[in-house]
Amino acid sequence: MIHSAPALLTDLYELTMAQAYFDEGLNDSAVFSLFVRRMPSRRNYLLACGLDDVLAFLESLHFDDEALDYLRSLKHFSEQFLEHLQQLRFTGDVYALAEGTPVFSNEPILEVVAPLVEAQLVESLVMNQVHLQTLLASKAARIVEAAKGREVVDFAMRRMHGTDAALKGARAFHIAGVDATSNVAAGQAYGIRVSGTMAHSYIQAHDDELSAFQAFARQYPGTVLLVDTYDTLAGVRNVIQLAKELGPAFDVHAIRLDSGDLRALSVDARRLLDEAGLHSVRIFASGGLDEDSIAALVAARAPIDGFGVGTDMGVSGDAPSLDISYKLVEYAGQDRIKLSPGKSLLPGRKQIFRVEREGVADHDVLARHDEVPPGRPLLQRVMSGGTRLPAGRVSLEEARRHARNELRRLAPSIRSITPAEPPYRVDVSERLQQDLESAVRHVTSASRM
Amino acid sequence: MIHSAPALLTDLYELTMAQAYFDEGLNDSAVFSLFVRRMPSRRNYLLACGLDDVLAFLESLHFDDEALDYLRSLKHFSEQFLEHLQQLRFTGDVYALAEGTPVFSNEPILEVVAPLVEAQLVESLVMNQVHLQTLLASKAARIVEAAKGREVVDFAMRRMHGTDAALKGARAFHIAGVDATSNVAAGQAYGIRVSGTMAHSYIQAHDDELSAFQAFARQYPGTVLLVDTYDTLAGVRNVIQLAKELGPAFDVHAIRLDSGDLRALSVDARRLLDEAGLHSVRIFASGGLDEDSIAALVAARAPIDGFGVGTDMGVSGDAPSLDISYKLVEYAGQDRIKLSPGKSLLPGRKQIFRVEREGVADHDVLARHDEVPPGRPLLQRVMSGGTRLPAGRVSLEEARRHARNELRRLAPSIRSITPAEPPYRVDVSERLQQDLESAVRHVTSASRM
């Protein structure tokens, strides 16, 4: 709706700091690390997501005339700096986890290595996109896990936080294993399978439910009929009546239950359908579902073949934000840290090594990037000198496959929706620990000066 | 980022239903009502927001060739229907609350009166925008209330759900009374005051904190210095050192505390600053704040002059979604309802009458639109025949003023951040209650047929 130049989708302080760096001639190479400090209490892992949009943003970063005119109007910025911004493109390197990689607290999801001004300016949008998409992919992976192979469809668009979340969320859900989306724009943008049949309004617009079913089934062979507008089991009986009327021409794929006690109603609906010989009509459930209610329905053997999941997945209801940070860890070849209470940092460029035993991830080692402990390194260079490398051009289907493969390599207790005891183990390498202590000594002695 | 035609920002079922209506010749006038069924447990009221974007969307609604080609590729839609979509524009009327009006459960935020196909097609995006903006304005109003006149600045962009949420959220926060935003794009798009100075990375990029303060203060007279990178009170002493060095040239507006025990640190910082004669240096606090922690700081008389509020406001952390619905309540001149458990409906076009005593809202009466009980009617016609009326063209500053005036008319217990006992009273008019009963009888007898 309102258009804003992406370069201005940033916090003002990025620009005021950038101008100060520019004036002070502080533009050596900087390393910023993006990571989640503490996991939400009900997450055993997060699923890294959002890299593709980050790289697209970095590749296209520029300040257009409209943006520069607006910045000029603020009277904070010198003409020299605005000229610098006009020329500015992102020329740095990015090291990142492939989208769909499980990641744990304090592990970098990505690291940016670039001249300080550039690396600083991109902070807010890089965080915004990785936060959103990692948050939603992580939540969706739990829903898919709870559904134990039953179909999961994204119904969330209407209650997600705006249009960008709805679009990027559908993409993140797809990577996490969700089967289809109701969001047509996401189908158009990403080629994700779209799904959807009828709402209560369609039933209400007709004189009675049976007439609505008759008209819709005629129009859409293989459709799904929503049965709870007035009374769920009466709705099921109308579907059975329709089958009697149509005989062999009856072609309804499923009914959808959207309210009430889904377990009891699914049992009764299944029985009614089976008694009428309609064994092939599937039962689809929706209405305020989350991973807990889905797991409970699955555990209770409710005869439900698929789930439409909306709001709770769309806003990550139990944990709507992540404690994500983008922090300077190295500047001009020197380690950098901070010591704010509860917000300390591990210095320098890093690598994550995942140590597996018989194909199952046992623990990770967080190390300096040039260490070679045992284990599989997870951070890859995806952009060099502002240009994407092949590792930064991964199709959506590849990302989805990668997520499935990586999730299979987690122990069942970690993949589970219940808190793992013990949680997944992340060790800090001896060298990284020593470098932190040395940086703390350095800062402490400097601040005593 | 990825561009998608707004007309496709919808759920697939809106399009499948629309085609069925089209084929069945069901295109009489429909009334859809948008309302929140149940309030989140910690909300005494919601602040209606998002109308401006809804009306902009309705005015510009059209299906372009790219959208039609994509829909054609799905093989669900006939050429006749796609031709109908190509011609389709929104020609209906909209009745709505002015942005910034407090609203309660089951009260319409807006009602759409339009040919059935049009009114159905716009559902998903209308919900998406009103949900997001009402959610965020309602949360921000609580933060502003808790701050009791102290400055509140939006720092949320990086952890909000995508770019659209960041932009529309800054607008919603402004309407709710937030004083400024860090989001530069929101400044550009809406003219909202932008604010921001430095992050920890600026301090870290320098050899020590004092050098960083010296450089930044030279560059930006009247700035804010962040003091908690290594040790908050040592940071305050560095500010005092800077004042000694600069003498009369010292011009720092404030310090910012971003971690630790903000009450204790603000007391100590205030004392240190005052002892150094720096009475005019203000104290600004940020770091994981919400309305409860702000209220606690204010109640404890912490000497804090302003708050930077991020994540919790940006995602409405304690209630990240609303139970919002867009429901058919009238079609072809007949009342429509549904009876799904816990999701029943009041039929027909409505009006909200706010009854005030001595300038304070006492209760609302929810009635048919043509009733005339006592009280001030709140829903206004804002669009007619697809064109905005003057009541639908309200500037952002007018909306902010309207919110302030309307919030002042709520009783302190309702405006409060603690749950009101008793909650605000909303009566249903006798006629509306009778019409509901009559519609229930009608539906029940039809479903027995």
Image (cartoon, coloured by chain):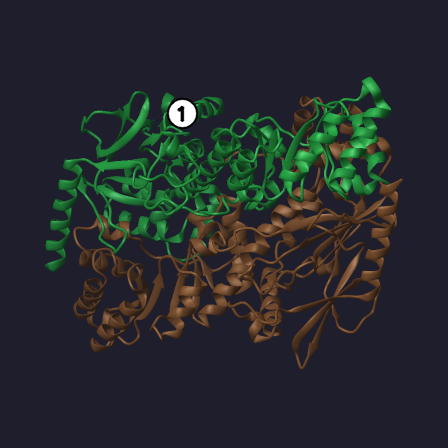
Chain colours: A green, B brown
Kindly indicate the quadrant of the structure image that contains residue A298.
top right
Tell me if residue A44 can be seen: yes
Can you say whether A407 is above or below B55 in the image? above
For label 1, the SS is: helix
Give the image quarter of residue B263: bottom left
Residue A344, given in percent of the width and then of the height, sits at: 24, 49
Other-residue count near label 1 (Cα within 10 Å), few / some / many at <14 / 14–19 / ≥20: some
Residue that label 1 marks: A408
x and y percentages locating residue B110 in the rendered image: 71, 55
Residue B326 spot, x, y in % from top left: 70, 48
Which residue is located at x 37 percent, y 42 percent?
Answer: A122
Q: Is B261 above or below relative to B92? A: below
Q: Chain of mark 1?
A: A
In this orientation, which residue lies closer to the viewer: B191 or A320?
Answer: A320
Q: Residue furthest top?
A: A248
Q: Residue at x 66, y 42 (%)?
A: B124
Q: Considering depth in this image, is A181 or B180 the residue closer to the camera?
A: A181
Q: Position of residue B426 (x, y in %)?
A: 70, 67
Give left or right: position of B44 versus A238. left
